[in-house]
Amino acid sequence: MRLRQFNQAGVDAFSKFLTACRENPNERVPMELAESDQHTILISDEIFVEPREFSTRRDAADYFHRILSPLSPDAVRKDAGMWTWLSLFYFDQICPNPNGNRKVRNDYTYLFMPDQSRHFYRHLLFIAWQVKQIASEHNRLFLDSSLVTLDKLTTEVFKRLYLTRIPCVFELLDRLYWDRRTNRPAKGIVSPHKISAGDLMHRLPTRIRQLEKTYDLQSLNADQLLEILGNEFQQRAAESNPQMEFILE
């Protein structure tokens, strides 16, 4: 199917479906909206989307980067109608219906709201594309996870634009919070009820806010930023990767 975007009528119709589906999990997905001239606008004759299964957020990120590459990244980042249309097209992927028990989450999970600072990063398909767009290399913390829900780790980083705008931050995050011993994100780094040394949810944002008053964080590489973050973060990096213990000396 050629890539399209919802107009306002399409967004409204999809929103009504989400409401109905919360009341009746077996509500039929209105796929006819995807090609309706009353509800959509064609984006390109040359970009096609196809039914696919995404095992992880990385699968979705790779796919959308490939098919959307002819478009301007800035246009992709702002296109509410396109990402909302893609939510309908891949609805069974992002909102599966196991045993007739589909669980529809908040609207912003499926309706893309690029101008809403509290909601734009919560769109399940957009955030997959966005992670790979701004973190093309150091992204395993965010992409090697399920597409169906937005994990707390991704939320805590992408809701803070001042973090994502630091060029070296994703390499730093990988060093700090990817546990090389378990090949998984480190435990206890996004606990809402417990503050631990060098954690992601509490200590890192606080320390970055302190440092940006004195340093030009945009100009630093990951080694330099880790050095000025201080001992608690150097210790965190050493625990995640024992090969980095020399930093503490």
Image (spheres, rainbow, N blue to C red):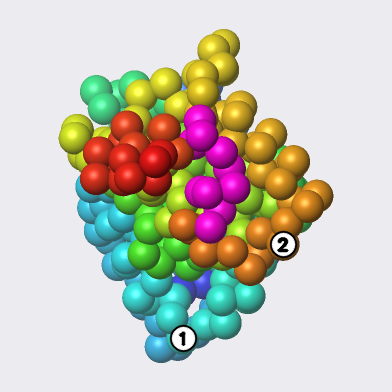
> Could one spot residue 196 in this view of the protein?
yes
Q: Which of these two is toward me, 157 or 151?
A: 157
Q: 10 Å neighbourhood of mark 1: few (<14), some, or many (≥20)? A: few
Q: Position of residue 13 (x, y in %)?
A: 62, 48
Please give the name of the residue rendered at 56% of the width and 17% of the height, measured from the top-left corner: 195
Q: Does the stretch in magenta take in 5?
A: no
Question: As rendered, which of 108 and 62 lies closer to the eye?
Answer: 62
Residue plotted at (51% across, 72% down): 4
Dot label at residue 70: 1
Left or right: 101 as drawn, with respect to 169: left
Residue type highlighted by circle 1: Pro
State which region is magenta.
Answer: 224-233
Q: Secondary structure at mark 1?
A: loop
The residue shown at (40%, 67%) is 136
- Kindly identify which residue carries mark 2: 216
Report the magenta stretch's main SS.
Answer: helix
Q: Residue furthest top?
A: 193
Q: Where the C terminus falls, by quadrant?
A: top left
